[in-house]
Image: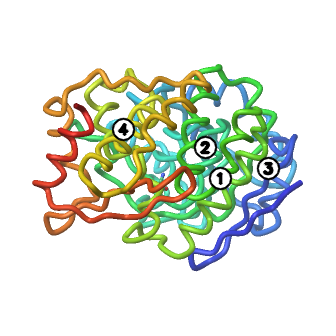
Amino acid sequence: MKRISITVPTSYDIILESGALSRVGEFLSEIYSPRKVCIIADSTAGSLYSETVSASLKESGFTPSRVLFPAGEHSKNLTTYANVMEALASENLSRSDIVLSLGGGVVTDIAGFVAGTYMRGIDLVHVPTTLLSAMDASVGGKAAVNLLQGKNLAGIFWHPRMVICDPDTFKNLRESQIQDALAEGVKNATISDASLISKIQEGDLEYMLERSLSIKKSLVEVDSNDKGLRQLLNFGHTIGHCIEKASSYSVSHGQSVAIGMVAEAKGAFAMGYTKNDISGELEKILKSLGLPTELRYTAEELYKYALIDKKISDGMIALAVPESIGKCTLKKVTLAELEEFFNRACD
Ligand code: GLY
């Protein structure tokens, strides 16, 4: 078993252990006495894992209940959020009870937003069952739903009290879901560790997960509210989120980030924000992993969505600019410069 502790400023543990799903109750007993635990899951994770988690919770004296919603990015909206909130109230969940997310990034986001706002905030535990949510969404406290106008526009920072990850669940993922995680792995390598690329190409997913968590930990611990260095994690996401929205979420998050990273690297060089054009190198790496790199949208089609990016503040936005594979810096630009950046990136 591995444990990574993260301090934001309260500390919580990320537990990585094969078979952890059937020990969820035991792990929760380390920090909680018996109480109600509402499992929030999507239809996929719910049918695969909620029985195991419920049984483990009962064995340790907790009282589990379950709220399910349909799997997929299209569920990440205010309607699902409201339905889950009302389900918690119908269960008479109190402020001293626990919300437990079980699933991928969509579940993590909805459960986090619900936990942070139900009765002005109750405790949250994440049990990510996809590699991507284990590497990213379950750690760092970002929780949001999409609005019609764009991705992740309604949300909160709400940190979990514990993250319990059972890598055995990754065996049930589709190849495309693994590839989505590889795109985030390449992003983490590009922002801070070039040597991670060869590990990803060798298929060492365990190493990729642990190294990605340590990179994320180092950024979140110095900037939990995403006002400074944490924004490096947005490399590929400024354009990536616009691609997701423009495609009505038919291009997955990982695919969009892959395409977004190549485009942003190209745009950053063309704008003179970096001396090196690493877009070709990135393209080769991403293609070797089976990820798409070709941008099928014009700057005009994408830029309108960038204007509602929540990172815009006082008419400025910070872009993560790659100097080389392994080193990114932040560059603050005006909206006029952002538009030009999109033009050059999508050229
Ligand atoms: N997913 C990027 C972050 O948590 O900041």
What's under tag 3, amino acid-wise?
Answer: Val
The secondary structure type at the circle numbered 4 is helix
Residue named by callout 4: 240
Quarter of the image holding residue 15? Answer: bottom right
Classify mark 3: helix, strand or loop: helix
Residue type of the residue flagged with mark 4: Gly
Identify the residue shown where x is 80% and y is 51%. 16
x and y, in percent, of residue 248 in the image: 30, 24
Q: Is mark 4 within 8 Å of ligand 1?
A: no
Looking at the rendered image, the quarter that the C terminus falls into is top left
- Side of 105 where 12 appears, left or right: right
**Taking 180 as reference, is 19 above or below it?**
below
To which residue does mark 3 refer? 24
Q: State the mark number for residue 239.
A: none
**Within-10-Å neighbours for mark 1: few <14, some 14–19, many 20+:** many
Q: Are marks 3 and 2 in contact (CB under 8 Å)?
A: no
Q: Nearer the viewer, mark 4 or mark 3?
A: 4
Q: Are marks 1 and 2 in contact (CB under 8 Å)?
A: yes
Q: How would you rate the neighbour count of disc 4 (Cα within 10 Å): few for under 14, some for 14-19, many for 20 or more?
A: many
Name the residue carrying label 1. 212
Residue at x 38%, y 21% (from the top left corner):
250
Disc 2: which residue:
185
> Which comes sooner in the sequence, label 3 or label 2?
3
The mark that comes first in sequence, 4 or 3, is 3
